[in-house]
Image (tube, rainbow, N blue to C red):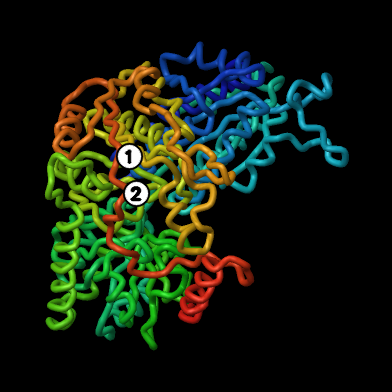
């Protein structure tokens, strides 16, 4: 019996295949690849570009302005939808393809799915070298796309039409697997994209990739419950896996039943609502005093969906209990076994539900509950003081800006940030009211993420107000997708904070003996340093020139009105504010290891090294 076939180009077949892929979890079905971002050049315009023209009925196309930014938008989209739906990004060969590398690294570090479809050099090599081809003298099969290999969770180069079938299936497997996901790259030689082939109809049939909730091994679960019952000062560290698994309710039920306090990583913040009695806020270098104080004396640290970055562990100085042990619940075995932990390799929700059942009747000592609740109350007072603006007609500090924003947003608004001094202030101070409200990309902390990610989030949740918070340094990295937001009518709210330089790195430079060298946006002074007058840039005018509505605010009172107006607008709106540079955030409650020069001639570095050596002595390797 002959097999039914369809004659299409490789690019046409790929787009049709992608349009028929779905995920399903808990009975909810979604498109796995819901749309494709693209910037076209000679390496993809006649292949994937032509295929997208023919497939507009089944594959939405989104026009981007920067290849890296397109990946950021796709990441924001996938994160908002708990990694159950993703987007593709296509570029030409050459600079367009290599511009994907930063975005791919961000996606893979944060374990967020995105499909990358860069054009590639001719597979036939009949025109050799072609424009933008990288000639490698000892390896003829290398192209610039090989730079994507180390930052991709799956990589394949489709050098013949028939090789698309296993490559595409392998790509979908990884994208839909919560333990394996990240950036997936299918490099597409430009000649192969346009080549016709007879494809089996089965290749285009709807295919559902079931996202399972693997349960914990019963013996490991029993050991975990015994460890919790035997602990006097247990502490939960909630990571991004709580959100990805939609395990917030299960975590709350465990905290309610046992009284175990919950601290959160940047990715895990919002796992409990801020006013839950067991929620202690952020942990680690940018954490709260109550979280970090409990971490230092914890005898059991229960990591749920966290990869234990150095910010979380305060560079291995935070967990100082003499007999501290670790219990890790994670869908990824690699993370579950970190820090010599007792490991539960399972879906976060399934694991939490099982652990709660096994701990029936168990509760921490009432004195421990009273201790952390008192600490939480003290920290709430710190937040109130940082947010307070005694003079409504004065220029706001950065923390007063956050307090003002807090008074304007609704419970389901999404606040997005990634880099600069804001992540530290937000982690310590922001009062997350819903699971998706706090959207910090701090795995890669990529400047320029916020605006395109805001577009992606808004695409995933069209009725949700979205706030992209950026400083001037981040804004100058990548404002290009403002044009996309305007073109598509995506009313992202941009809060643009002018502080004339790299404020976060300036402070870090000062602490580590760098004397804020090269961190200010100023003219050169007579001595050659960047210590002259601030540069006369007008970023608000720049945002307006790209099509945004712009509201300038000079005081706290004007800022509150501007934020409210932005939230009510149906247009992409920028609120521009210059902040008072006076430090207003609480000091770091734990250390972060940034090595300081061991020998130096300047006093600032010499003194910074002394401080560094005192902290280094507290480092501990947990085995």
Q: Say which element carries label 1.
A: strand
Q: Residue 356: image x %, image y %?
A: 22, 69
Instruction: Decide if residue 573 is in sight here.
Output: yes
Q: Which residue is located at x 23 percent, y 32 percent?
A: 553
Nearest the viewer among 493 and 37 is 493
Q: Residue 20: image x %, image y %?
A: 44, 27
Quarter of the image containing the N terminus? Answer: top right
- In the rendered image, which residue does mark 1 sit on? 469
How would you rate the neighbour count of disc 1 (Cα within 10 Å): few for under 14, some for 14-19, many for 20 or more? many
The answer for how far apart the CA atoms under marks 1 and 2 are is 8 Å
CB atoms of marks 1 and 2 within 8 Å:
yes
Query: On screen, 336 above or below 47?
Result: below
Q: Which residue is located at x 42 percent, y 52 percent?
A: 504
Query: On screen, 547 above or below 159?
Result: above
Residue most extreme to the right: 137
- Quadrant of residue 41 in the image? top right
Q: In this image, 473 relative to 294: left or right?
A: right
Residue most extreme to the front: 526
């Amino acid at each position: 019996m002959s097999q039914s076939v369809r004659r299409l180009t490789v690019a046409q077949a790929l787009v049709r295949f992608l349009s028929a892929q779905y995920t399903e979890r808990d009975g909810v079905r979604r498109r796995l690849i819901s749309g494709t971002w693209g910037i076209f050049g000679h390496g993809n315009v006649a292949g994937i570009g032509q295929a997208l023209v023919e497939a507009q009925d089944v594959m939405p196309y989104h026009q981007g302005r920067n290849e890296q930014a397109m990946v950021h938008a796709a990441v924001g989209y996938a994160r908002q939808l708990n990694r159950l739906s993703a987007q593709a990004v296509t570029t030409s060969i050459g600079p367009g393809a290599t511009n994907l590398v930063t975005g791919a690294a961000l996606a893979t570090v944060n374990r967020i799915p995105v499909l990358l479809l860069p054009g590639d050099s001719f597979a036939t090599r009949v025109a050799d070298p072609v424009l933008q081809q990288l000639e490698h003298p000892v390896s003829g099969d290398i192209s610039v796309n090989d730079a994507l290999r180390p930052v991709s969770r799956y990589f394949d180069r489709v050098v013949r039409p028939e090789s698309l079938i296993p490559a595409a299936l392998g790509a979908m497997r990884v994208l839909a697997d919560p333990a394996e996901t990240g950036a997936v790259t299918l490099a597409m030689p430009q000649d192969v994209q346009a080549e016709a082939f007879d494809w089996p109809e089965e290749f285009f049939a709807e295919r559902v990739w079931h996202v399972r909730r693997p349960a914990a091994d019963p013996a490991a679960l029993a050991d975990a419950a015994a460890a919790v019952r035997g602990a006097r000062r247990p502490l939960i560290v909630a990571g991004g896996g709580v959100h990805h698994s939609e395990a917030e309710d299960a975590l709350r039920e465990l905290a309610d039943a046992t009284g175990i306090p919950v601290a959160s990583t940047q990715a895990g913040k919002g796992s409990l609502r801020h006013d839950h009695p067991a929620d202690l806020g952020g942990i680690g270098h940018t954490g709260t005093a109550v979280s970090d104080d409990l971490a230092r004396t914890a005898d059991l640290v229960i990591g749920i969906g966290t990869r234990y970055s150095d910010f979380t562990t305060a560079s291995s100085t935070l967990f100082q209990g003499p007999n501290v042990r670790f219990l890790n619940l994670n869908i990824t075995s690699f993370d579950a076994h970190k820090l010599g932990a007792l490991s539960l390799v399972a879906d976060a929700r399934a694991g939490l539900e099982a652990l709660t059942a096994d701990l029936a009747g168990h509760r921490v000592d009432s004195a421990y509950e009273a201790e952390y609740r008192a600490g939480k109350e003290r920290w709430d007072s710190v937040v109130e003081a940082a947010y307070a603006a005694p003079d409504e007609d004065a220029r706001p500090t950065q923390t007063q800006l956050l307090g003002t924003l807090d008074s304007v947003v609704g419970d389901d608004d999404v606040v997005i940030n990634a880099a600069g001094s804001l992540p530290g202030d937000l982690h310590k101070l922001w009062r997350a009211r819903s699971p998706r409200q706090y959207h910090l990309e701090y795995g890669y902390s990529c400047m320029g993420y916020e605006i395109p990610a805001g577009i992606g989030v808004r695409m995933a949740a069209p009725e949700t107000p979205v706030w992209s918070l950026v400083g001037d340094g981040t804004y100058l990295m990548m404002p290009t997708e403002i044009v996309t937001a305007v073109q598509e009518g995506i009313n992202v709210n941009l809060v643009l904070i002018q502080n004339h330089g790299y404020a976060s790195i300036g402070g870090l430079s000062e602490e580590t003996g760098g004397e804020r060298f090269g961190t200010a946006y100023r003219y050169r002074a007579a001595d050659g340093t960047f210590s002259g007058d601030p540069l006369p840039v007008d970023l608000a005018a720049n945002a307006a020139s790209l099509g945004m509505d712009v509201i300038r605010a000079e005081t706290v009172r004007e800022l509150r009105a501007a934020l409210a107006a932005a939230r009510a607008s149906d247009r992409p709106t920028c609120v521009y504010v210059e902040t008072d540079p006076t430090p207003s955030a609480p000091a770091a409650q734990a250390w972060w290891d940034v090595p300081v020069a061991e020998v130096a001639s300047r006093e600032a570095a010499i003194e910074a090294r002394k401080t560094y050596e005192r902290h280094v002595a507290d480092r501990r390797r947990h085995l």
